[in-house]
Amino acid sequence: MSPEPTLSPALQLLLWHSALWTVQEAAPLGPASSLPQSFLLKCLEQVRKVQGDGTELQEKLCATYKMCHPEEMMLFRHSLGIPQVSLSICPSQALQLTGCLRQLHSGLFLYQSLLQTLEGISPELAPTLDMLRLDIADFATTIWQQMEELGTAPALQPTHGATPALPSAFQRRVGGLLVASHLQSFLELVHRVLRRLARP
């Protein structure tokens, strides 16, 4: 078994800083749901896959462009207008499965849009970025199919809304770090919700 990769101190600090948002959102969860166990286990597997892709993208961006200090990222976040996705419905005392699944799907759909704006960021990062987008799309499809089985899917698939304009290469690099960081915070909360629901 190969040893787990060691994150750089700067990336560890950035991840810790981003995780503060996750902790703030993570109120106690409601009772377990009647969602199929096979669906929950598949989602947990997909979450871990996307988390791995996101970590790889962060590490490569940090190593290549040396822009991982949390204070710098906070300044860039406000100037670039990179949004964060909330899962306020999922970690509530009265868990609403329909609303939670829709919020989860909408969040994944937004990250697909945000990652689309990073296209052309770097030839070296293109394979990692493409894999991340593909795995997020697969995860979103899993959620959508479950909503269809429950009869709770909206009549139409959501459309990609407006995303921040990142015209320069520098903005795309910074945007890539912010999107990857926000995505990891989002996925940490998703993972926690899914583990709670998957308990027997």
Image (cartoon, helix red, strand yellow):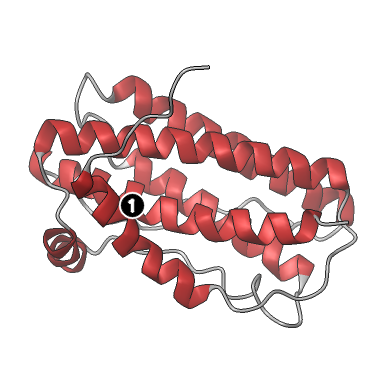
Which quadrant of the structure image shows residue 190?
A: bottom right
Q: Position of residue 198 (x, y in %)?
A: 79, 54
Q: Is residue 56 left or right of residue 165?
A: right
**Residue 150 vertical placement versus 88 (above, below):** above
Closer to the camera, 17 or 113? 17
Q: Position of residue 65 (x, y in %)?
A: 10, 37
Name the residue rendered at 40%, 39% in the picture. Answer: 54
Name the residue rendered at 81%, 61% in the picture. Answer: 152
> Badge 1 local density, few (<14 within 10 Å), some, or many (20+)?
many
Query: Is residue 185 among what the camera can see?
Result: yes
Q: Which residue is mark 1?
A: 181
Name the residue rendered at 67%, 79% in the picture. Answer: 92
Name the residue rendered at 19%, 26% in the picture. Answer: 122
Q: Is residue 124 left or right of residue 194?
A: left
Which quadrant of the structure image shows residue 15?
A: bottom left
Query: Is residue 159 among what the camera can see?
Result: no
Tag 1, which secondary structure?
helix
**Residue 195 vertical placement versus 173 (above, below):** below
Which quadrant of the structure image shows residue 104?
A: bottom right
Closer to the camera, 192 or 89? 192
Q: Position of residue 127 (x, y in %)?
A: 35, 20
Give the farthest residue toward the bottom: 93
Q: Position of residue 159 (x, y in %)?
A: 52, 52
Query: Quarter of the image containing the C terminus?
Result: bottom right
